[in-house]
């Protein structure tokens, strides 16, 4: 007698995992995740179930959210599965509550994955078809139409979707057959959400005409995933460099056609760990940043990333905090100072750095560039504007306003991570402080 599709899928997944690998289930308390958790608990033989645990993320969006967490505790206690309940509060954003909740949820998952852990989610065949159609209606290319991969990296671990080939009906049959009690979120019926509208209004009509539509659409997503992989390989080969590097030479793009340049940019950005931008954003990078005048300071931003240009190089980075020219912070020079832009610290050093005696005599003031500051780096014959000093050293413009300046008795004494000004440096026999500046990544 053959087992059901859910158990077969879970068994295949477990067979592919190392015997001692920790398995964590993203457990919402709904039908799909309850079925996955139950099937894993039933399938793991002997003491294998002891490496199984669950993570429940409480977004606090629904009035019954705390009751749902209690339900999850009850289920996991019955199954003898450890449960980690994570409470998150969403920050209002343009992306909408669904996307914000998903982002917060996966951030919580990522934080709880140790090296080599596997996080399993209960996404299934119908979810895959819905995701493909949503991306299609948004005008996505092959990367977006790839929908959800069966396996992907997530933080220090791996994200696995063992039920991706299992239809919703088979999951429902499993839940009924094992008399599982699960949460039914009323928001899943609200047609104002795009996915719910597709699920309840569109997909039933499609499947009435084409019964195998979910599986066929999922197969199309697989074809698009193959095309996306080819595109990434072509893009990487077109660059022939910059794997994981946060800068990219404009020369590397200059001989490429626009289509290949977009592939190359996407490959570079993904290789640096940033979410791939849309074609519209890629075109903006080519038109507004790559093609900008040499003395321009262009910027193109999208979710979680910014691309800028300086001296023939593209730079990608997380969104920078705003510059704070009016901020002034007192510092004793001994304890590390946490600032919105990064961390300022000092290491004792004989005959190097800022004269320690001066720091002991008076309180240091830390502020940022306002314009017009002058600096005579120790050992140099004349002073220059701070802007000119930065230019000579090749410090990009967006970094200049975010480098801490250390003042003693109203005079610029040091530029953290760069220079000590003449008159404030320690002599060879004196104790000094090496100022270290670690900007936020």
Image: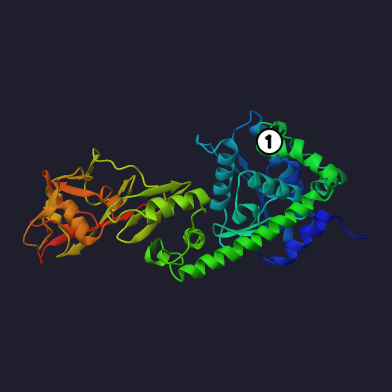
Q: Position of residue 416 (x, y in %)?
A: 23, 54
Furthest residue in direction left, as rendered: 381
Q: Position of residue 61 (x, y in %)?
A: 60, 32
Furthest residue in direction top, as rendered: 63
- Horizontally, residue 372 falls left or right of residue 416, namely left
Q: Residue at x 41, y 55 (%)?
A: 316
Furthest residue in direction right, as rendered: 1
* Nearest the eye: 103 or 234: 234
Which quarter of the rendered picture does the N terminus lie within? bottom right
Q: Residue at x 29, y 60 (%)?
A: 311
Q: Position of residue 214 (x, y in %)?
A: 78, 49
| Classed neighbour count for the residue bearing mark 1: other residues with Cα under 10 Å, few (<14), some (14–19), many (≥20) | many
Q: Position of residue 312 (x, y in %)?
A: 32, 61
* Nearest the eye: 234 or 389: 234
The residue tagged 1 is 68
- Horizontally, residue 301 falls left or right of residue 59, namely left
* Nearest the eye: 297 or 54: 297
């Amino acid at each position: 007698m053959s087992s059901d599709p859910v158990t077969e899928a879970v068994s295949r997944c477990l067979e592919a995992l190392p015997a001692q690998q920790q398995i964590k289930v993203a457990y919402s308390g709904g039908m799909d995740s309850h079925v996955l958790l139950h099937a894993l608990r039933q399938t793991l033989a002997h003491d294998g179930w002891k490496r199984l645990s669950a993570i429940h993320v409480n977004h606090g969006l629904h009035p019954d959210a705390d009751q749902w967490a209690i339900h999850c505790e009850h289920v996991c206690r019955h199954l003898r599965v450890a449960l980690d309940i994570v409470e998150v509060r969403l920050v209002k954003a343009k992306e909408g509550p669904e996307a914000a909740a998903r982002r917060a949820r996966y951030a919580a998952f990522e934080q709880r994955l140790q090296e080599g852990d596997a996080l399993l989610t209960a996404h299934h065949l119908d979810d895959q078809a819905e995701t493909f159609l949503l991306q299609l209606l948004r005008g996505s290319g092959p990367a977006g139409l790839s929908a959800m991969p069966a396996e992907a990296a997530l933080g220090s671990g791996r994200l696995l979707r063992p039920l991706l080939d299992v239809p919703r009906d088979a999951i429902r049959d499993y839940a009924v057959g094992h008399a599982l009690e699960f949460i039914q979120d009323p928001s899943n019926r609200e047609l104002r959400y795009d996915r719910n509208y597709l699920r309840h209004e569109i997909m039933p009509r499609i499947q009435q005409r084409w019964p195998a539509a979910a599986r066929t659409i999922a197969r199309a997503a697989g074809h698009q995933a193959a095309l996306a992989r080819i595109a990434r390989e072509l893009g990487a080969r077109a660059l022939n460099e910059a794997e994981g590097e946060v800068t990219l030479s404009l020369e590397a793009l200059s001989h490429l056609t626009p289509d290949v340049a977009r592939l190359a940019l996407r490959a570079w950005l993904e290789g640096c760990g940033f979410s791939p931008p849309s074609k519209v954003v890629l075109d903006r990078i080519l038109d507004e940043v790559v093609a900008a005048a040499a003395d321009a300071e262009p910027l193109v931003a999208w979710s979680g990333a910014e691309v800028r240009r300086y001296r023939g190089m593209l730079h990608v980075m997380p969104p920078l905090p705003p510059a704070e020219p009016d901020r002034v912070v007192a510092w004793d020079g001994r304890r590390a100072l946490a600032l919105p832009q990064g961390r300022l610290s000092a290491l004792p050093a004989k005959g190097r750095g800022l004269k320690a005696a001066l720091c002991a005599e008076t309180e240091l003031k830390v502020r940022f560039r306002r314009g017009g500051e002058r600096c005579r780096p120790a050992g140099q014959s004349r002073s220059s504007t701070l802007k000119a000093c930065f230019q000579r050293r090749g410090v990009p413009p967006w970094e200049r306003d975010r480098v801490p300046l250390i003042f003693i008795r109203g005079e610029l004494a040091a530029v953290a991570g760069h220079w000590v000004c003449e008159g404030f440096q320690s002599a060879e026999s004196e104790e000094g402080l090496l100022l270290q500046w670690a900007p936020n990544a």
